[in-house]
Image (tube, grey):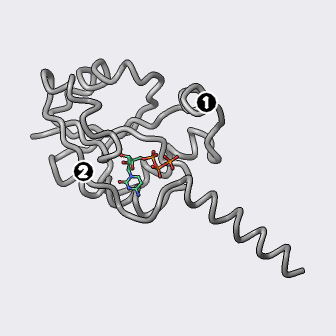
Amino acid sequence: MKTVITFGTFDLFHIGHLRILERAAKYGDKLIVGISTDKLNFSKKGFNPVFPQEDRRDIIASLSFVDKTFFEESLEMKGEYIKEHKADILVMGSDWAGKFDEYKSICEVVYLPRTTGISTTQVKQKVIEMEKFHFSEL
Ligand code: CTP
């Protein structure tokens, strides 16, 4: 029985999020997802996600292949979360390649390639561009 753990903000849930979670689930028998809190995102990026943490958590928790979710309050606590949830494998997107190698002493660490052509940032930019186009047409 292998437990996989992964982390992310998963704001404006999109196909890249779905794909990485699907692939992460296949690495074990149980998938646990740490959802970055609004506070953690604000401290990292200087702005809040569009969707509040409870909504982001509920969307992820509704996926059939996600067994458990929790809030990730701090980036530095990854090791504690891995131990607390008895995770055997940490899966992260390739944007984090090499950044979590320190956890190789407590679990297997796997970096998966990102889905190309989409990110939350790109979705936000696209909506802004569409709005600009829409209003320029009026
Ligand atoms: N992810 C992915 N493919 C994408 C976008 C995200 O595999 N096209 C993965 C990330 O590598 C990460 C997880 O999804 O493991 C959560 O990523 P997150 O940072 O929440 O999403 P992004 O779309 O990358 O958000 P942002 O644009 O704000 O960085």
Count the labels in the image: 2
Tell me the kind of residue under disc 2.
Leu
Q: Is residue 93 above or below residue 18?
A: above
Q: Residue lying farthest left?
A: 1
Could you tell me residue 33's position as x and y percent? 35, 40
Label 2 sits on residue = 112
Q: Amino acid at mark 1?
A: Phe
Earlier sequence position, callout 1 versus callout 2 = 1
Residue, far right = 138
* Contact? badges 1 and 2 (CB < 8 Å): no
Indicate yes or no: mark 2 CB to ligand 1 under 8 Å: yes
Viewed as shown, does residue 44 lie left or right of 7?
Answer: right
Q: Residue at x 15, y 46 (%)?
A: 28
- Which residue matches tag 1? 42
Give residue 38's position: percent from left, percent from top.
59, 33
Q: Nearer the viewer, residue 99 or 105?
A: 99
